[in-house]
Amino acid sequence: MKHKKLIERLGAEKIQDILDNAHDDAVYYVDEWNEHFKVHGYCTDKCIIGVHNPQTHYRLETLKRLIADGQNRST
């Protein structure tokens, strides 16, 4: 599952930071370079599949659930 691989690559603490800083309307975390904002990794409320790479888009709800499940297992 690509969401688990992202958590393994970035670490649970970084994912939690992404979730904490996501704007209220955000649905996805996009793990790619944004030329307009000159930043790698950003949250957005929509993406256009076919234009953007779906392998770099992660649903925030799924990340949130996986982080919560991981914290519950470690306690």
Image (cartoon, rainbow, N blue to C red):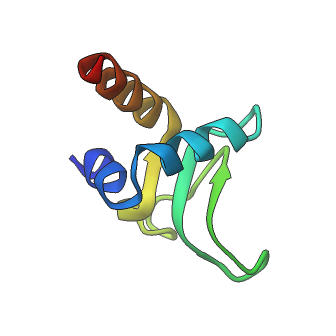
Return the x and y of residue 10 as percentages of the image width and height. Answer: 41, 58
Name the residue rendered at 55%, 51% in the picture: 29
Q: Quadrant of residue 37?
A: bottom right
As rendered, which of 38 and 70 lies closer to the eye? 70
- Front residue of 8/37: it is 8
Image quadrant for the C terminus? top left
Residue drawn 35% across the image and 49% down it = 7
- What percent of the width, then of the height, locates residue 1? 20, 46
* Direction left: furthest residue: 1
In the rendered structure, the answer to whether residue 73 lies left or right of residue 47 reads left
Residue 66 versus residue 57 in the image, above or below: above
Exactly how many numbered labels are in the figure? 0
Residue at coordinates 67% horizontally, 44% vertically from top-left?
A: 45
Picture quadrant where residue 19 is located: top right
Task: Please state the horizontal and vertical placement of residue 60, each as a whole percent of the image.
Answer: 52, 37
Residue 22 shows in this picture = no
The structure residue drawn at horizontal position 70% and vertical position 83%, both measured from the top left corner, is 35
Residue 49 visible here: yes
Q: Is residue 33 above or below residue 30?
A: below
Check the image and report above or below for 53 versus 14. Answer: below
Residue 4: x and y, percent? 27, 45
